[in-house]
Image: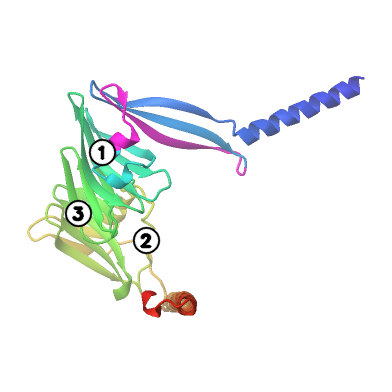
């Protein structure tokens, strides 16, 4: 009898464990990140147990309140002045407090088909929204020096946002931010068409190039800066380059730089891999176009068989 009871108890424990794992053993926490008479922002974090890695995953979104009332999706779409968003479910994924009554906000539709980065403030019970970018890719602010945020528009151009006083500075091209001092930003990019790495000084207020240093890609390895912290990026810059903000500004490779180099053999391997990738892309594109052309021919043939003019099918 005791063996039977122990077996039943063991089965019950196993069943309960399986149910808890299936449910995710999660929870929800709420934390107010901004609260004024007119605007309140609450971070809502859901924690779920990922049974594949046996770790909790945390997902944070933000709920907005204007004059004590939760801001609905339709009301937010009205502030956006975006008619296409009025029937969408909207998720606010990032909120950075930039003033006592203002946040830098990243939002997207539930299905991820559109996103926005905005500057939201509220005074006297009325919300004001300034749209910074609209995209179909990503609108979350990226790493940047203190007091700044980085964004990329639909065409992958850099957008620098100064949080206080608030200002938006578009910079042409896809760049990673290394350092900002006053009205000057140090940027890094890879220009594969010309097989070179670029470190450039730019005047933020005018998108004006002040100085730049080119590094041949067949000599220097690409640095791993994409996910580096702002401090690590700054350290990389000043460990390898001498920077002057005088008139004229200048940037020069330091004689004692620690940049990694590559051998001609390694560069030849890179070139061969690049050639193979381009050929594969060309084949895939040609095959896709051939399938599309074949489909159009079938449709035109079917329309002709029904007596419809073939010219109607473009």
Q: Which residue is mark 1?
A: 78
Residue at (29% x, 36% y) in the render: 76
Residue at (25% x, 49% y) in the render: 133
Give the side of residue 196 with respect to residue 29, left or right: left
Which residue occupies the foreground of this view, 20 or 246? 20
Residue at the front extreme of this rendering: 307
Residue at the left extreme of this rendering: 247
Which picture quadrant has residue 199?
bottom left
On residue 170, which mark appears? 3
Quadrant where the N terminus is found in the figure: top right
Give the side of residue 52 with respect to residue 302, left or right: right
Q: Earlier in the sequence, mark 3 or mark 1?
A: 1
Q: Which residue is mark 2?
A: 223
Percent coordinates x, y for residue 84 in the rendering: 31, 47
Indicate whether residue 70 is drawn in magenta: yes
Give the side of residue 18 with respect to residue 91, left or right: right
Percent coordinates x, y for residue 231 in the rendering: 31, 46
């Amino acid at each position: 009898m005791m063996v039977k009871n122990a077996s039943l108890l063991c089965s019950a424990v196993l069943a309960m464990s399986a149910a808890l794992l299936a449910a995710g053993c999660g929870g929800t926490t709420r934390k107010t990140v901004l609260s004024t008479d007119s605007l309140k922002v609450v971070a809502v974090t859901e924690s779920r147990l990922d049974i594949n890695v046996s770790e909790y995953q945390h997902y944070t979104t933000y709920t907005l309140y204007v004059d004590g009332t939760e801001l609905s999706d339709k009301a937010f779409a009205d502030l956006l002045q975006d008619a296409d968003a009025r029937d969408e479910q909207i998720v606010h994924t990032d909120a950075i407090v930039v003033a006592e009554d203002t946040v830098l906000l990243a939002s997207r539709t539930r299905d991820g088909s559109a996103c926005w980065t905005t500057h939201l403030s509220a005074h006297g019970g009325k919300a004001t929204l300034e749209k910074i970018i609209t995209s179909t890719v990503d609108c979350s602010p990226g790493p940047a020096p203190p007091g700044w945020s980085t964004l990329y528009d639909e065409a992958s151009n850099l957008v620098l946002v100064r949080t206080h006083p608030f200002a938006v500075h578009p910079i042409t091209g896809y760049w990673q931010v290394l350092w900002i001092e006053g009205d000057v930003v140090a940027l890094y990019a890879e220009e594969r068409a010309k097989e070179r790495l670029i470190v450039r000084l730019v005047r933020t207020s005018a998108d004006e190039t002040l100085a730049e240093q080119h590094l041949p890609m067949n000599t220097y390895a690409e640095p791993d800066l994409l996910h580096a912290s702002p401090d690590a990026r700054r350290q990389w810059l000043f460990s390898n380059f001498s920077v002057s903000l005088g008139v004229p500004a200048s940037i020069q490779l330091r004689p004692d730089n620690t940049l990694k180099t590559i051998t001609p053999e390694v560069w030849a391997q890179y070139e061969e891999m690049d050639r193979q990738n381009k050929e594969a892309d060309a084949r895939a594109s040609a095959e896709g176009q051939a399938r599309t052309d074949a489909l159009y021919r079938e449709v035109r043939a079917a329309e002709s068989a029904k007596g419809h003019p073939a010219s109607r099918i473009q």
